[in-house]
């Protein structure tokens, strides 16, 4: 007869997760899991990087955070600025400022293309990277070499 006591770590885990969500809610720009990990550690949380990765992936699948791949191939996360529904992001490559947008034309064109080729149950991601107006005025000279292309 074995008695398995309920895992003590359970409660602690959920409070760690709520700390993670609090930090994400304060984010104004997309950050990598490593940057989020650093913020949490600075606040005294002992949450591990692997745990953060897993939680962030789950939250993004649930639509609670936005996840995207930066031009340098890094996976970045941020609280979604738009409560619901499919949308796109316009992101400053320098400061990370983000605009959320919907564009009907994108939806129409992508579904037409899919239909034309006989695809069903399609989805897409569209993230637009650029340099925002305030970064253009502050660093005009230092961005002569665009990273993309
Ligand atoms: Zn969003
Ligand atoms: Zn900017
Ligand atoms: Zn779309």
Image (cartoon, helix red, strand yellow):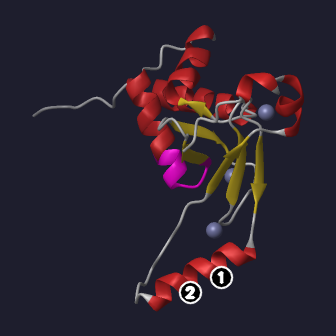
What is the CA distance from the residue labelled 1 to the residue labelled 2? 6 Å
Question: Of the numbered discs in the image, which one, if any, rests on residue 127?
Answer: none
Identify the residue at image location x=54%, y=45%. 149
* Highlighted range, magenta: 58-65
Query: In the picture, residue 38 is in which quadrant?
Result: top right
Query: Seen in the image, is 120 located left or right of residue 69?
Result: left
Pick whichever, 82 or 139, lies toward us: 139
Pick whichever, 46 or 133, lies toward us: 133
Q: Which residue is mark 1?
A: 108
Pick whichever, 80 or 90, lies toward us: 90
Picture coordinates of residue 90, whole percent (x, y): 72, 50
Residue 59 is inside the magenta segment:
yes
Picture coordinates of residue 57, whole percent (x, y): 46, 44
Pick whichever, 14 or 72, lies toward us: 72
Asked if marks 1 and 2 touch (Cβ < 8 Å), the reply is yes
Q: Quadrant of ligand 3?
A: bottom right
Q: Which residue is mark 2?
A: 112
Identify the residue at image location x=76%, y=38%. 131
Picture coordinates of residue 24, whole percent (x, y): 66, 33
Residue 57 is inside the magenta segment:
no
Identify the residue at image location x=50%, y=70%. 123
Seen as rendered, the residue at the extreme left is: 1
Q: Is residue 84 above or below residue 20?
A: below
Q: Is residue 107 above or below residue 20?
A: below
Other residues around mark 1 within 10 Å, as few (<14) / some (14–19) / many (≥20): few
Identify the residue at image location x=58%, y=39%. 77
């Amino acid at each position: 007869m074995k008695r398995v006591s309920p895992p003590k770590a359970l409660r602690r885990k959920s409070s760690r997760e709520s700390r993670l969500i609090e930090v994400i809610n304060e984010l104004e720009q997309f950050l990598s899991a490593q940057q989020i990990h650093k913020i949490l550690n600075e606040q005294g949380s002992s949450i591990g990087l692997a745990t953060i990765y897993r939680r962030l992936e789950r939250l993004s699948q649930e639509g609670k955070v936005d996840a995207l791949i930066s031009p340098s191939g890094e996976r970045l996360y941020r609280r979604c600025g738009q409560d619901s529904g499919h949308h796109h992001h316009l992101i400053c490559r320098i400061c990370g400022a983000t605009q959320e947008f919907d564009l009907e034309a994108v939806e129409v064109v992508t579904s037409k293309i899919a239909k034309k080729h006989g695809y069903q149950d399609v989805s897409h991601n569209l993230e637009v990277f650029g340099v925002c107006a305030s970064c253009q005025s502050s660093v005009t000279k230092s961005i002569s070499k665009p990273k993309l292309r």
